[in-house]
Amino acid sequence: MMHVLNIHFKKKWGAEFKPVKAGIGVALGRALVIKAGGTGISDLVYMGDVVNTASKMCGLTAKKYNDPICVTEDVFNNADRYLSRLNLKSNDDYGYVYTGNFSERNLVVISNAYNHRRDHG
């Protein structure tokens, strides 16, 4: 998808265009979620170490590993076989991380497994 967007924007803006990069970072832990806002505004604000770590994993996708997804070791270990296609990478700041790519089908399977664990303990 990013490749398609970059082609479209390069045609639109020419040589001045710098490619868009995006990634997904995933961490496991507890976060504080607060509903914030005033009249007509209702936003959720997520706070905690896990939010910061997930953000750092996201940054690593484009800056260091050039893979679309990066998860912490805890996420990898708790997701069992669903993440087995990811590659182990050592990172000086965050220990071991796993990077790679998913198909849409794999993400649905992971989501279903999470929902099953949540509902059935």
Image (cartoon, rainbow, N blue to C red):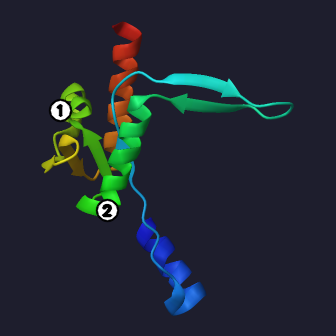
**Circle number at residue 96:** none
Residue 13 placement (x, y as % from top left): 58, 86
Element on which disc 2 rests? helix
Q: Residue at x 17, y 49 (%)?
A: 91
Relative to 110, 30 lies left or right: right
Q: Residue furthest right?
A: 39
Between marks 1 and 2 in the image, the one whose residue lies nearer the viewer: 2
Tell me the crowding category of disc 1: few under 14, some 14 to 19, or many 20 or more residues within 10 angstroms, Cα based: few
Name the kind of residue labelled 2 in the image: Lys
At 39% across and 31% down in the image, what residue appears?
A: 50
Q: Is residue 86 above or below residue 50?
A: below
Give the farthest residue toward the top: 121
Question: Residue placed at 60% from the left, 32% from the top?
Answer: 45
CA–CA distance between discs 1 and 2? 27 Å
Mark 1 residue type = Arg
Q: Is residue 71 above or below residue 101?
A: above
| Earlier sequence position, callout 1 versus callout 2 | 2
Give the class, few, some or many, for how many residues have Cα within 10 Å of label 2's Cα (few <14, many ≥20). Answer: few
Quadrant containing the C terminus in the rendered view: top left
Say which residue label 1 marks. 81
Report the side of 120 relative to 89 (left or right): right
Closer-to-camera residue (84/42): 42
Where is residue 118, by image quadrant? top left
Q: Which residue is mark 2?
A: 63
Q: Residue at x 76, y 31 (%)?
A: 37
Dot 1: what SS?
A: helix
